[in-house]
Amino acid sequence: MLDRALELKAGRDRGVGGDSLAGRTVALYFERPSTRTRVSFGVGVAELGAHPLALRADELQLGRGESVGDTARILSRYLHAIVIRSASHDTVEELAAAAAVPVVNGLTPRHHPCQALADLLTLRERFGELEGVRVAYVGDGNNVARSLAILGRVAGVEVRVATPEGYELEPGVAAIDTHDPAEAAAGADALYTDVWVSMGDEADAERRRADLDPYRLDEDLLAAASDRAIALHCLPAHPGEEITEGVLYGDRSAVWDQAENRLHAQKALLELLVG
């Protein structure tokens, strides 16, 4: 999939993959605000020759009480795939269980697998290979950290996760779990962070900022990593909170390539699932 993503990226100006999903329709169903996921999937579907169909709950009978399962059964009769970004992981699992077409998790509170694909693509571009690459994730042990750790293990990437007490991933997901960001960062090839207050966490914002303050991705933490280390962030960023401006916009930032790579990785995923 990553090989194909690199081919699609290199050949984008020549229209590589432009007819691989011709005649298909892919629904983009979003319960939550989105910039990168919404735009990258919409553009990606169109560039593969398919039609992106944007849907919202208030436009469907789902918003008036029709079950998720019945919605999945009906949509499967019209569509070739469904991309869903939901506030409930259970909703995505229920949709996937009842659907007869591929269902892609565009983000839930538990997982963000498409982001992890783009992360691996970015690491592959920067380092030429994935086996043995070391990534230190610092901050909240959230959906981004979980998917990165799971997919990183499949790809041979050592993912170390440093969180405050009470913010940890479940045991055994990451290669290394620690409460010390410097320990995670030591010799790492990439340092990664995410916002401290995600959607749905607003009521606990003050406490979360206080707990996570020692886990900021700053110049000192980057200096503890390897000489070739890059900085990663899934965005949107809040400079001065989880990451400093100097790191986010500095020479060692791969954040903007990482964001672009959502498009290419997801196009390869859609080809695999739908084409």
Image (tube, rainbow, N blue to C red):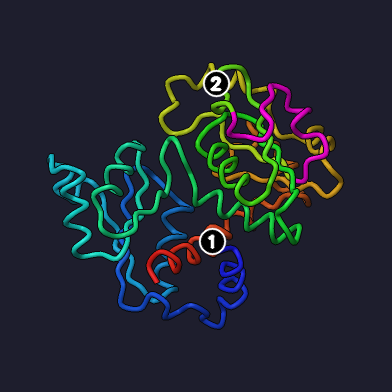
Please tell me whether mark 2 sits on a helix, a strand or a loop.
Answer: helix
Q: Amino acid at mark 2?
A: Arg
The boundaries of the magenta stretch are 172-189
Q: Is residue 65 depicted above or below 28 in this figure?
A: above
Q: Is residue 16 left or right of residue 33?
A: right
Is residue 177 found inside the magenta-colored segment of the image?
A: yes
Residue pictured at 33% horizontal, 48% vertical: 30
Which one is nearer the viewer's eye here, 202 or 258?
258
Residue pictured at 60% horizontal, 73% vertical: 7
Question: Which disc is residue 104 wearing?
Answer: none
Which one is nearer the viewer's eye here, 143 or 173?
173
Q: Is residue 216 left or right of residue 61?
A: right
Q: What residue does disc 2 label?
A: 208
Q: Whole-percent x and y of residue 64?
A: 12, 41
Residue pictured at 29% horizontal, 40% vertical: 91
Image quarter (top left, top right, bottom left or bottom right) of the N terminus: bottom right
Q: Amino acid at mark 1?
A: Ala
